[in-house]
């Protein structure tokens, strides 16, 4: 059986018109599970199709998607427990912060 491969059929750096989730994960350096999750999430808008029930990604459409910014969701960063909210008198516990929800300004003593 010369020429057959075990596992994923295409090597890294393939020039095929349609890529498998494994090839896309290798290209984007994320897990294959993440690629499949993005494909099922309409918010990511990652270009994909199903060919005979198998998930595939058009190489040209994927490259355009990446050039346009690809996955643009904001990451939230955790804030230490005990932080006070803007009008809170008691600690609010652990919260998630983002650029649109910054931590309150620290008061300085004079």
Image (cartoon, rainbow, N blue to C red):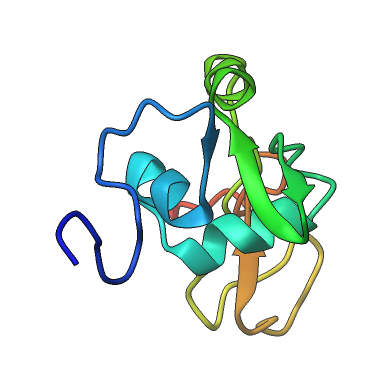
Residue 77 screen position, x and y as percent: 52, 60
Residue 41 screen position, x and y as percent: 79, 55
Name, please, the residue furthest toward the front. 1
Name, please, the residue furthest toward the left. 2
Nearer to the camera, 93 or 24: 24
Can you tell which quarter of the image residue 71 is in?
top right
Residue 68 screen position, x and y as percent: 62, 16
Can you tell which quarter of the image residue 8 is in?
bottom left
Nearer to the camera, 108 or 94: 94
Q: Residue at x 40, y 47 (%)?
A: 23
Q: Which residue is drawn at 61% across and 39% down?
A: 57
Q: In this image, 19 relative to 43: left or right? A: left
Q: In this image, 109 relative to 103: left or right? A: left
Vertical order, 83 against 27 (above or below): below
Vertical order, 75 against 49 (above or below): below
Nearer to the camera, 91 or 28: 28
Q: In this image, 2 relative to 105: left or right? A: left
Vertical order, 24 against 79 (above or below): above
Nearer to the camera, 77 or 110: 77
**Total count of labels:** 0
**Quadrant that contains the N terminus:** bottom left
Q: Which residue is drawn at 35% across and 56% down?
A: 9
Q: Residue at x 48, y 75 (%)?
A: 80
Can residue 110 be seen here? The reply is no
Residue 50 screen position, x and y as percent: 77, 50
Can residue 21 be seen here? The reply is yes
């Amino acid at each position: 059986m010369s020429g057959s491969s075990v596992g994923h059929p295409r090597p890294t750096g393939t020039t095929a018109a349609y890529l498998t989730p494994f090839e896309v994960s290798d290209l984007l350096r994320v897990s294959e599970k993440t690629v499949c999750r993005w494909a099922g999430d309409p918010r990511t808008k990652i270009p994909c199709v199903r060919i005979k029930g198998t998930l595939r990604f058009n190489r040209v459409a994927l490259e355009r998607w990446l050039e346009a910014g690809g996955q643009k969701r904001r990451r939230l960063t955790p804030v230490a427990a005990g932080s006070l909210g803007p009008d809170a008198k008691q600690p609010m516990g652990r919260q998630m912060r983002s650029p649109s929800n910054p931590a309150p300004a620290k008061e300085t003593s004079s």
